[in-house]
Amino acid sequence: MQVDRDVSGWLAAQRTSAPAELKEYYAKFEDLYDRKLWHQLTLTIEKFTSLLAAAPYLLPLYENFVVDFEKRINGISLVQFLTKAARQIKDPKAALAFLSAQADKLKSSSTGKEAYVLATMEAAHYKQVTGDLDGCKKSIDECEKLLDELPATEPVISAAFYRVSADYYKAKMAYQQYYHNALLFLSSVNIDDLGVQEKQERAYELAMSALLGESLYNFGELLIHPVLDSLKGTIFEWLRNLLFQFNLGDMEGFEKTSRSGDFLKQPLLANSLPFLRQKLCLMTLMEVIFKRSKEARGRMTFFEISRETRVALDEVEHLVMKAFSLGLIRGKIDEVDSVVLVSWVQPRVLEKSQIKTINDRLDDWVAKVHEQVSSLEQNESIKTLLVQ
């Protein structure tokens, strides 16, 4: 079967007018289409799509060629192509209409839920861009239910879901939800595939969310993520350092940073200074408990907590109650003896200095065990000599 005359004529015209580096692709398109080699044709289209010079030609390629056999293409590959084609539509509302129409077609097709979820989430991106946050959230909720029904999903699906979800929560200034979704997005992609600017923007937004999130008291996962290193050598390196100051309970470092011009130029941080100070006190309390041995952490005096967290002695009980209510520590307060009995501290993702603390503690434990063993062996030797 030969290529349809209109399709063949269009491909021939494109082959004539396209840039030199694209001409050969139109010849391959026609040959593979003629031989019904759909998989090979899909792979060739993917290579074509990855070329920077091909961007202005994607939408015409779909409307004049791909639409003729789109049902024969892998659903996910088709949506990835359509997403790149939609980026060439200048009007976000028109791009939304284009992708929504594609999602509607996929919903009733046999290509599977994943392709529909991917198309729906890419359309939801434009809902968020055009200000339809309610519509965006409905798409997120719908796709979340569909993904829960699947035993596994391809990374490209997860990446789209978490990327759009993070953008939605960023628009809503829901710091904790943004933080978790943004980290899940980064876990779904190869960070080396992200541009330098995108890495820096994501590192900045994650850092701000970590600091401002009301229930975020463990930054370990972000601190060990390579995306945070993108802030090194930039005007926001101080923000990266600030995260480490919080994580380690560095009171002096925080006070110095909070008085700097860089910090004060960030209204969200400057206006949240009382909250940040309390958050630092709570994280310092967790770090102090973490560093102590099991025996020592079981009983902490109000004076010790006041000294470590720099909270007034008469405010220690309120600080500890806050830590209890947030689920950061468990235990009880002995008001008579002004002592806090700690039975548990929230598990943490550790960065290098905290891992070293554990290593040092293990070394101490090994040394004590060795000492005990040596003592027992010595006692046994003495007993043997006495018996003899």
Image (cartoon, helix red, strand yellow):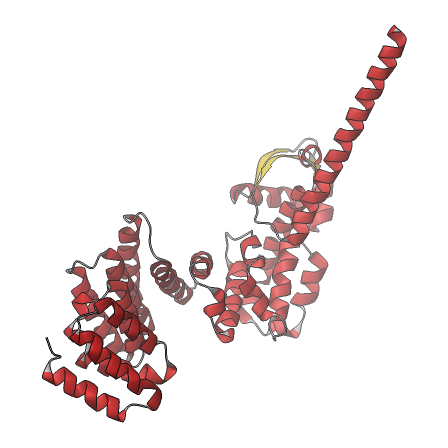
Whether residue 386 is visible here, answered yes or no, is: yes
Q: Write the residue at 25% across / 79% down.
A: 28
Q: Position of residue 305 (x, y in %)?
A: 69, 44
Q: Is residue 341 above or below residue 286?
A: above
Q: Is residue 377 above or below residue 298?
A: above
Seen from the viewer's position, the closer of residues 56 and 34 is 34
Quarter of the image holding residue 6? bottom left
Quadrant where the N terminus sits is: bottom left
Quadrant where the C terminus sits is: top right
Q: Position of residue 292 (x, y in %)?
A: 70, 40
Q: Is residue 7 left or right of residue 192?
A: left
Seen from the viewer's position, the closer of residues 353 and 298 is 353
Q: Is residue 48 above or below residue 217?
A: below
Seen from the viewer's position, the closer of residues 374 and 262 is 374
Name the outermost residue toward the top: 387
Q: Position of residue 71 (x, y in %)?
A: 17, 66
Q: How many marks?
A: 0
Q: Is residue 70 left or right of residue 56?
A: left
Q: Is residue 291 left or right of residue 7?
A: right
Q: Write the residue at 38% across / 60% down.
A: 162
Q: Write the residue at 51% across / 74% down.
A: 196
Whether residue 313 is visible here, answered yes or no, is: no
